[in-house]
């Protein structure tokens, strides 16, 4: 694949702009300046640099973001900045989208990708992908309330009981709850249904993938789909 096409596929601008990056000496491959935009490279496994920033070739982009408070999971945010503003320009140009949503005041693991099939696979209700949340509660939770979350609670807009896949009290006001659904404000509403209130919410795991320990709020990293 030509260098300009590789840069274009990775979100570095139009083909003309990508050719200009090479001609201007802003692209390096294997530690050497890559000045010919028409030079052919094998894209799989290719590592290159643009303006000194390392970039691995990714046929489909998939990243994990440690979402901080105060960001909306939307391409058209209404009240707060979009989580997309935390990502570098090339990823935004590629059109990565959040896999599901976290509320503005919820922190933790958020996946973003430009692979529509992955988004469908991981968000469709029938797939039952487990998500683990750490909820800080306003009041100590009794064992009976924890068991009720496992047995099912009824929300005012849905006659069908919603059950937690798992619910563990780390301490009296720290609930670790696992859900496979994705209803609006589901954790908060389920906790409210058993007479308590969520004061803080953090997603620590999506599928098999736990939030990478090295990621600070607002930071992102590449991940492999097989790890989710």
Image (cartoon, helix red, strand yellow):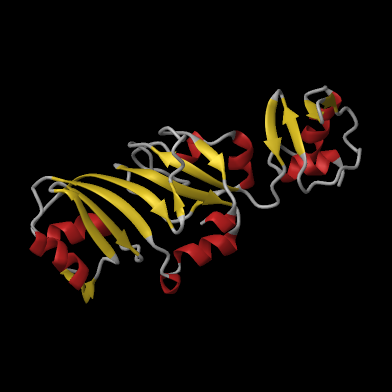
Along the viewing direction, whichever of 134 and 124 lies nearer the viewer: 134
Residue 144 is situated, as x and y percent measured from the top left of the image, at 8, 64
Q: Is residue 140 above or below residue 159?
A: above
Residue depicted at x 8% and y 49%: 140
Quadrant assignment, res 194? bottom left
Number of disc labels:
0
Q: Is residue 153 above or below residue 89?
A: below
> Is residue 58 toward the left or the right of residue 105 in the image?
right
Residue 108 is situated, as x and y percent measured from the top left of the image, at 37, 43
Does residue 101 appear in this view? no
Along the viewing direction, whichever of 202 and 15 lies nearer the viewer: 202
Residue 189 is situated, as x and y percent measured from the top left of the image, at 19, 59
Residue depicted at x 18% and y 65%: 149
Residue 66 is situated, as x and y percent measured from the top left of the image, at 43, 40
Along the viewing direction, whichever of 187 and 223 lies nearer the viewer: 223
> Is residue 83 toward the left or the right of residue 183 in the image?
right
Specify the farthest residue to the bottom: 160
Along the viewing direction, whichever of 107 and 71 lies nearer the viewer: 107
Residue depicted at x 39% and y 62%: 130
């Amino acid at each position: 694949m030509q260098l300009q096409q590789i840069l274009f596929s990775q979100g570095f601008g139009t083909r003309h702009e990508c050719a200009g990056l090479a001609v201007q000496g802003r692209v390096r491959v294997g530690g050497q300046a890559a000045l010919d935009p028409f030079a052919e490279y094998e894209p799989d496994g290719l590592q290159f640099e643009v303006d000194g920033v390392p970039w691995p070739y990714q046929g489909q982009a998939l990243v994990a973001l440690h979402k901080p408070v105060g960001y909306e999971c939307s391409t058209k945010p209404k009240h707060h900045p979009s989580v997309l503003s935390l990502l570098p320009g090339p990823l935004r140009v590629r059109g990565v989208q959040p896999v599901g949503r976290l509320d503005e005041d919820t922190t933790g693991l958020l996946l973003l990708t430009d692979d529509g099939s992955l988004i469908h696979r991981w968000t469709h209700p029938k797939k039952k992908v487990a998500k683990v949340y750490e909820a800080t509660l306003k009041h100590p939770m009794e064992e009976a309330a924890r068991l009720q979350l496992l047995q099912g609670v009824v929300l005012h807009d849905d006659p069908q009981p919603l059950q937690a896949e798992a619910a563990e009290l780390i301490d009296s006001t720290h609930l670790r709850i696992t859900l496979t659904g994705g209803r609006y404000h589901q954790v908060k509403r389920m906790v409210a249904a058993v007479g308590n209130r969520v004061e803080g919410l953090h997603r620590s795991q999506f599928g098999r993938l736990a939030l990478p320990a090295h990621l600070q709020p607002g930071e992102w990293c590449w991940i492999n789909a097989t790890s989710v």
